[in-house]
Image (tube, rainbow, N blue to C red):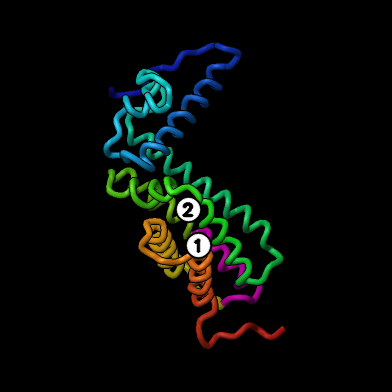
Amino acid sequence: MTGRLRPPTGRYGGKSAQQRQVERRSRFLDAALQLFGDTPGYRATTVAALSETAGLSTRQFYEEFRTLEDVLAALHLQVNDWAEQAVVAAVAGAGHLSLPERAAAIFRAYAANVTGDPRRVRITFVEIIGVSPRLEEQRLARRARWVDLVCAEAQAAVARGEAVPRDYRIAAAAFIGSINGLLHDWNAGWVDATLDEIVDELVRQLLGILRPVGWELPAV
């Protein structure tokens, strides 16, 4: 197949064509989370297997997607969107907290969202790697969004006098890498720790970046 088929139009079963399309797409993504995020994984999944798991036909698959890579791309974005929404909500609710408390609340929200379903960890940190230049570009673009978020929170802390003024972009990129690696290894069972211990370690690392040795909080 070189392109998607044209989906049917008009109402059916009380639902518009657009509503049915949204529902079909959601079912394919749910099936992809199950198959890509668990067994057999993205590389061993076929269009027929994905369609069967979704309870839909292969024709309906090609009405929504061109290839399985398109499904993985959409699922990767969805999983990242879920995590980002959790973090944004945590940021909004943590404005009254001290920097250590705020950082802990934000990291706990992110970690709970990503690791609450092991399949999300696999999609985010495993299945997306090495698929194609296109997906690598998407992965790096989403990581850049996380870097931007860390930088924005760091500069907000600077404005409040809670962190040292500096350019945080390189430090934020390194820190995001450590978050991804640590959560992946913890989820895989390679790190013997509780999730709270993981969050506490990440908070200590971040505070070490924001408040390096020798820097003191401004006098009030």
Disc 2 to disc 1, C-alpha distance: 9 Å
Q: Quadrant of residue 15?
A: top right
Residue occupying the point 57% across, 64% down: 153
Kindly give the residue lying farthest to the bottom in the view shown. 214
Tell me the residue that label 2 is attached to: 115
Q: Which mark is residue 184?
A: none
Magenta range is 148-163
> Dot 2: few (<14), some (14–19), or many (≥20) neighbours within 10 Å?
some
Q: Where 59 sits versus 32, above or below?
A: above
Question: Mark 1 — residue?
Answer: 195
Q: Residues within 10 Å of mark 1 (few under 14, many from 20)?
A: some
Whether label 2 touches label 1, CB < 8 Å: yes
The structure residue drawn at horizontal position 37% and vertical position 52%, both measured from the top left corner, is: 125
Residue at screen point 60% across, 53% down: 88
Element carrying mark 1: helix
Quarter of the image with the N terminus in it: top left
Side of 130 relative to 147 (left or right)? left
Q: Is residue 140 magenta?
A: no
Give the amino acid type for the residue marked by disc 1 in the picture.
Leu
Q: Which structural element holds mark 2?
A: helix
**Which quadrant is home to the C terminus?**
bottom right
